[in-house]
Image (tube, coloured by chain):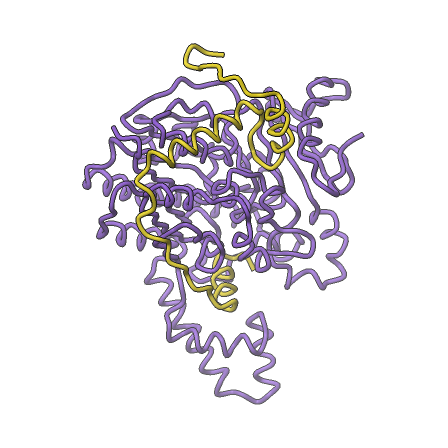
Amino acid sequence: MTDSPNIIIVVLDTLRKDVLRAYGGGTSSPNLDVLAADGVVYQNCVASSPWTAPSHASLFTGLLPSRHGVHESWDNKMLQVFGSMKSVSAEPLASYLADRGYETTCYSANANIAPGSGFERGFSSFSLMNVDPPDDSKQVLSMARSYGRTRREIATNLLKQGKVGDLTRLYLEDRRLKREYKKMNFPLFKGGDRIATSLGGRKLEQPFFLFVNLLEMHEPYLRGEPGMEPKPIADLFGKRTVGKQIMEAIRHRYAEEVSTVDSFFGAILHWLRDSGTYDDSMVIATSDHGQSLKEMGFYGHGTFMHDEILQVPLIVKYPGGSKPKLKPGYQPLHRVQEAVKDSLVGVHDGISLTSDHAVAESFGIPNGLESVSDAREFAAKRARFDRPRKAVYMKGLKLVVDGHEGVIEEFTKARKPLGPGEFSEELKEMVGVLRELRDVGFKLPA
Amino acid sequence: MSSDEKVVPVPAELYAKLSELIGKTSAESVDELVVRIIRDWVSKETSTGPKTRPVPIAAEDEKVVEERLKSLGYM
């Protein structure tokens, strides 16, 4: 075993832990089961944020979102957040490892972790591999965009301007795209198959750092083309509400996606074994956030601090098969990189992973609000949802504070609400943790 | 302190400075911060150093990014 083990981090995007067998769930994921058997299953990993960009920035920098700044706000949504990782002053994990002689490679299927996002800092090779419209469709799609945002808007404007030829061209292209997406097996596959194939043909110089984001568990789940499934953001505002029947189909498909992504994860393990590097490598499987499937009345992720969104799996296979004793406490996602850095100096005890508490931060709705923000009828709903929240997990308790009003949204033990006066000392301690963050403008309970 | 740990005296003034700077890090105590600083130095000194400088990657066109985010259902 060397002091410079290969490091492999696989983010199974949008994977909640409770579906996995390693966490008592029932979904078939034999390859993750193998990693669990060879490594350590951490029970209390908490995502730093309920959506991709801030959580990945935390994973890469070791800082909470309020510290690294890659997060949404009332005025800044996903497109504005894209690229903000470029100006983060903390050294990203890939740079740290590159500086210590590692070949650094990233395969991402998530468009938030794409070239130009700033997440490529420190990687010598960085590939975005997701479902992308075929090149010859892009021109037509670009033309369509200049006439509006929705299909109806585009068609209406084309008709108004008498451009029947363009409308016909667009209609035919739309049909062709549907067939193309079907061929790509979208939405069941969202790039993982392409990543597995590309990796299979590669040989990386050792030591290497391989970062992979597999997106299969992310919505959309049902329709064979982008933009057709009711979007979580629309559901939040009461538009195109996801009904019981569709939700049931989504839950079924989510489980199917877990098994699908597990097979792509298996291809990565196979590639490691084939190259003789599995045993001495550090292999980490985790997620950036989970997914609410309407357990709390909300479908999707981002914005809220539900357990289904924040509690993510963390399975670590240490180099040489070390199995450190589990220390009681929580494993905040942003501390994962400390365990990686420890492994470079031969420390494989997992101690730096664990803390007596874990914090997650949200700063409002991350999604673009183009379709809803201008609608007067949704203004009140937006004001209610689009606000900062922080969650603290400590001593088996959970506290969620709405920082816009400084009120407690949730104070629970094992998901059961606590009454006034219960665990008051612990509550003070948890509010104290948030006070320590000294986050400007975030109101705390009196 | 566990039997796997050793004590290294740190001058009080330096300790105080570290306490002031801890807010800029994710370390939860001065002890943790000191261990991280030492670890990072050791791993740098014992490494072979960078192989190649990472190649800057060109930014994507905003429209392309928007399209990809849309395909995820984000927008």
Q: How many marks?
A: 0
The answer to whether residue A215 is above or below residue A18 is below
**Vertical placement of residue A248 versus B67, above or below:** above
**In the image, what residue occupies the spot 50% across and 82% down?**
A167
Name the outermost residue toward the bottom: A162
Residue at the far right: name it: A446
In the rendered image, the residue lying farthest to the top is: B3
Q: Picture coordinates of residue A126 (x, y %)?
A: 37, 55
From the viewer's side, name the closer residue of A278 and B66. A278
**Which chain appears purple?**
A
Would residue A222 be visible to someone looking at this image? Answer: no
Residue A384 location (% of width, % of height)? 74, 47
Residue A48 image point, x, y percent: 55, 38
Which corner quadrant holds the N terminus of chain A? top left
Indicate the quadrant where residue A173 lies.
bottom left
| Left or right of A211, for residue A47 | right
Q: Position of residue A101 (x, y in %)?
A: 32, 43
- Nearer to us in this view, A165 or A285: A285
Question: Is residue A26 in sight in this rendering?
Answer: yes
The residue at the point 81 percent across, 30 percent down is A446
Colour of chain B, in one word, is yellow
| A417 w.r.t. A157: above or below | above
**What's the residue at 60%, 31% (across, down)?**
B22
Q: Is residue B28 left or right of residue A287?
A: right
Does residue A83 appear left or right of residue A202 in this picture? Answer: right
